[in-house]
């Protein structure tokens, strides 16, 4: 894992950041936007949206998943790693995010999160910085989906009112620094996971 302040070489690395909130002035989207500014050199960050993903319905899936679901799955597939940036609702994963993950957990869109390196961070107005929602989301992604979830370090941002402006933009330098360190660690995590995959492909056990 990269130490604090260390910046791995990451030329051509593509990170998809997915805010778990649809709100116009979402502080979680503000953190995802900030990732574009503070990512290690060579890391290209795209901020996605869950706005075009309808509620999961097996009948709709059978008829053919909606365009928004295909686009979301394609964006995940194209990324080297995915960063979920989500609030917690009632101590858990917001419904819009759970719904989107349910859609892309399906074989109809080739389960693009399986074996995908992922990070989970979040911002709350309260004191706990989404710790409970993150635990649930990590468990879902690792246990059910089979994503390669980075468990350390973690990034919980509490007290959003002091760190974001009224349009949801991050204005706190310390949080920017912590986010930059987190992203550097996620790049390192992805490189390690891919190195282990490569060893396994050659017939080794990868450990
Ligand atoms: C919340 N919020 C919240 N915060 C928290 O720390 N723990 C929680 O369990 C909840 N539960 C919760 C439920 C619902 C339905 C809402 C709408 C909100 C507050 C939440 O952290 C706050 O609204 C954030 O600002 C939401 O993030 P965005 O939309 O600004 O990114």
Image: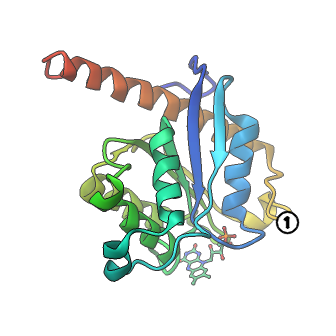
- Answer with left or right where residue 136 lies relative to residue 8: left
Please report the residue visible at 48 percent of the width from the left and 49 percent of the height from the top.
74
Disc 1 is placed on an element classified as: loop
Side of 67 where 27 appears, left or right? right
Label 1: few (<14), some (14–19) or many (≥20) C-alpha neighbours in 10 Å: few
Residue at the front extreme of this rendering: 63
On the image, which quarter does residue 176 sit in?
Answer: top right
| Residue 77 position by quadrant | top left
User: Which residue corresponds to mark 1?
Assistant: 167
Ligand 1 shown in quarter: bottom right
Residue at left offset 39%, top offset 60% = 104
Residue 125 screen position, x and y as percent: 68, 71
Where residue 205 appears, x then y in whole percent? Answer: 14, 22
Q: Quadrant of the N terminus?
A: top left
In this picture, is 9 found above or below 25? Answer: above
Q: Camera-side residue: 41 or 134?
A: 41
Placement of 134 over or under 23, stated as above or below:
above
The answer to whether any part of residue 207 appears in the image is no
Nearer to me, 64 or 133: 64
Q: Identify the residue at horizontal 65%, vertical 44% (top origin).
A: 46
Classify 190 as above or below 78.
above
Percent from the top left, x then y, of residue 106? 30, 62
Percent across and percent down for residue 24 are: 76, 71
- Point out the image quarter for the C terminus: top left
Query: Looking at this view, is 26 or 172 the one in front?
Result: 26
Using the rendered image of the protein, determine whether residue 139 is visible from the camera's viewpoint.
Answer: yes
| Residue under the point 72% across and 40% down | 36
């Amino acid at each position: 894992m990269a130490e604090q302040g260390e910046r791995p070489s990451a030329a051509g690395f593509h990170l998809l950041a997915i805010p778990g909130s649809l709100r116009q002035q979402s502080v979680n989207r503000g953190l995802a936007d900030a990732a574009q500014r503070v990512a290690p050199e060579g890391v290209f960050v795209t901020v996605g949206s869950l706005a075009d993903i309808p509620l999961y319905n097996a009948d709709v899936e059978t008829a053919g998943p909606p365009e928004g679901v295909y686009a979301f799955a394609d964006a995940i597939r194209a990324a080297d790693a995915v960063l979920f940036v989500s609030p917690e609702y009632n101590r858990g994963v917001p419904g819009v995010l759970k719904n989107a993950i349910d859609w892309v957990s399906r074989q109809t869109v080739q389960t693009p999160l399986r074996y995908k390196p992922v990070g989970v961070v979040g911002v709350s107005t309260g004191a706990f910085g989404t710790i409970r929602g993150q635990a649930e989301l990590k468990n879902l992604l690792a246990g059910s989906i089979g994503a390669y979830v980075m468990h350390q370090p973690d990034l919980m941002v509490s007290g959003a009112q002091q760190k974001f402006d009224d349009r949801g933009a991050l204005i706190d330098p310390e949080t920017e620094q912590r986010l930059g360190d987190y992203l550097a660690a996620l790049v390192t995590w992805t490189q390690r996971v891919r190195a282990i995959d490569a060893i396994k492909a050659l017939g080794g056990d990868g450990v």
